[in-house]
Amino acid sequence: MGQTRLLESRWDDAYAAKLDEPGKLLYRSNLLGADKRITNYGGGNTSAKVLETDPLTGEKARVMWVKGSGGDVGTIKLDGFATLYMDKLEALKGIYKGVEDEDRMVGFLPHCTFNLNPRAASIDTPLHGFVPFDHVDHMHPDAIIAIAASKNSKELTQEIFGADIGWLPWRRPGFQLGLDLEAFVKANPNSKGVVLESHGLFTWDNDAKTCYELTLAIINKAIEWFAAKTEGKTIFGGAVANALPQAERRAIAARLMPEIRGRIGRDERKLGHFDDQDAVLEFVNSVQLKPLGALGTSCPDHFLRTKIRPLILDLDTVNPDVDGVVAGLDKALEDYRADYVRYYETCKHDNSPKIRDPNPVIFLIPGVGMLSFAKDKATARIAGEFYVNAINVMRGASTVSEYQGLPEQEAFDIEYWLLEEAKLQRMPKPKSLAGRVAFITGGAGGIGRATAERLASEGACVVLADIDEAALAATKGDFEKRYSMDAVRSVTLDVTKEDAVLSAFVGASVEFGGVDILVSNAGIASSAPVEDTTLAMWNRNIDILATGYFLVSREAFRLFRRQNLGGNVVFVASKNGLASSPNASAYCTAKAAEIHLARCLALEGADAGIRVNTVNPDAVLRGSKIWNGEWREQRAASSKIEIDDLEEHYRKRSMLKLNVLPEDIAEAIYFFASDVSAKSTGNIINVDAGNAQSFTR
């Protein structure tokens, strides 16, 4: 399986002693889900049957707590479990009419709900309910699925586990499989679990800790068996390609991801993830890459995330021709989509849902690694993780036996299962910036941070770029806690350095697949009479506020055109770009240059759907780094007031008698960055609480 490190029990008796049975179930679930060798994100489920007080009768009732629909055992909380009366669940057997009745039975699960629990029960509920043990684990370990996906999986199961673990042939999860498990346990009362063909592992016991440690022990036994059987053997038929150097792999990924993203993201924006870990490279460089890739994945959880098979892109690792790969993308995608349509048309039923997005999710590239794309970054990353699981399964199965993917009809019947379709229809409507990536310069300052907050709140992923490393690290850490690690990246950036700007956009392309929104916000300020303005002061203003804006815009334009999905550029200029101020000639001139650059770019970008607009703030003191130093002192001196009175001075000076806050600027930026302003380009919004001098007309 590529590794022999065994799972270790992390059960803490002292901690567990303080927990009730549902608490122990939660504890066990989180421990199991914390290791991807045990189960992948969202995969598998756990349950416990306990005595609870019936809220109606006050009597004790036997209740099953089981992971609810769509949950993840690694991160689940207690409210993520469905609760069902066991007597009512058992009573469903009396109305079951056979396998053709399975979908109907799901509709009866809510009638078994205990204590009005709103958490929906999953399709796997009968699998847990009908096993006559208090604690049941259903996991998807790579080592077990490698057995389950082998051609002779039944014989391998018996060879490895003897009578301890049984085997059941493939059956789609549902009511009948629950009955099959019950029948197996009755016929084999001493068995500790069962391997489900092409699916995973069930284990059980009447004690929570024993069940947990049994699950680990069974997986470890499989890991050790594979280690012994595969030692010294050629994996995947050996290598036919060599991994390129890491920097080159990353550069190729950055080149390809925006091109792919543009081609598969026209109907629904996609975000990307790049993975070049050793397990991936071993597979993509191997003799068996194409034959195994064509067989598709085996475990239902795998292909629901990854589609049944990947798209393999040909790259000569001796003489890499990346331009040639780009040139062949349209044909490769056309062929993949045609094959997906064939799969749908061949396997569909009269009542099947309409065909879904026929584009690939997983892209495999010899010498480079794996690209995965989905509607958001987390889903793209998780899809990649699932395909790594599939690689591990193929590695084990093909080394000790013959790997077999799930037959297309079985795969289709799960992918287009009406119950799965109903789950998709219950998903919340995407936020307005879902699937979009915003690159924000000055991202750790007051306006930049507020902008990132506003765009992230609407579903955008954000790249925070700032020259202040400490502020950048603090901002990134805060956003990771509140929006997840998938939603934010950071880069230390001096916008005046051409190479640094190029590198920053390469990084954004590798991390997310591209960029959709540029908020050019890096700023400084200076104040001095013209006769006291040094050349260094003048150049510093022009370098950051004009040249810096040009450099990031140029690179954004290049990326936008490669993606061919349009684009959005928002300049954060200043009231001073329209209205001159005394003792600030360098600053005002640079800001005026920004505004005119934006107009020029609006002209150039329109044919590609690239919109360029400007937001002009005024006197945004709160949270602003440029107001923390000499600029604040200089503007106070220029107005002949005390520093502490400056904010009130600007409020009174405005026509509306209001202070302008970073959040106000962020709202205007969001307007331009979103589709709300889809028909606006070359425009300016002043957010200055009213200043007649800066009226645009």
Image (cartoon, helix red, strand yellow):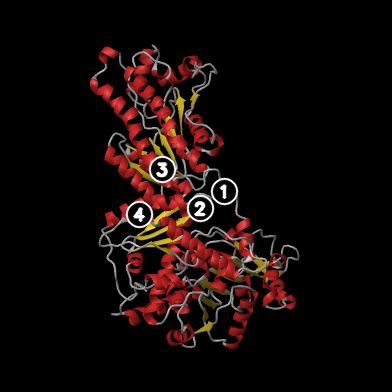
The front one of 419 and 194 is: 419
Identify whether 74 is placed above or below 2: above
Which numbered mark, 1 or 4, is in the foreground of this view?
Answer: 4
On the image, which quarter does residue 130 sit in?
bottom right
The front one of 436 and 20 is: 436
Helix, strand or loop status at disc 1: loop
Mark before the other along the chain sequence, 1 or 4: 4
Question: Badge 4 local density, few (<14 within 10 Å), some, or many (20+)?
Answer: many
- Disc 2 versus disc 3: distance between alpha carbons? 21 Å
Q: Contact, CB < 8 Å: mark 1 with mark 2?
A: yes
Q: Residue at point 57% right, 86% down?
A: 189
Mark before the other along the chain sequence, 1 or 2: 2
- Disc 3 versus disc 4: distance between alpha carbons? 17 Å
The numbered dot on residue 375 is 2
Residue under circle 3?
561
Residue under circle 4?
253
Q: Contact, CB < 8 Å: mark 3 with mark 4?
A: no
- Disc 3 versus disc 1: distance between alpha carbons? 25 Å
Mark before the other along the chain sequence, 2 or 3: 2
Residue under circle 1?
430
x, y percentage for residue 329?
41, 56
On the image, which quarter does residue 93 sit in?
bottom right
Q: Contact, CB < 8 Å: mark 2 with mark 4?
A: no
Question: Badge 1 local density, few (<14 within 10 Å), some, or many (20+)?
Answer: few
Identify whether 482 is placed above or below 99: above
- Disc 1 versus disc 4: distance between alpha carbons? 27 Å
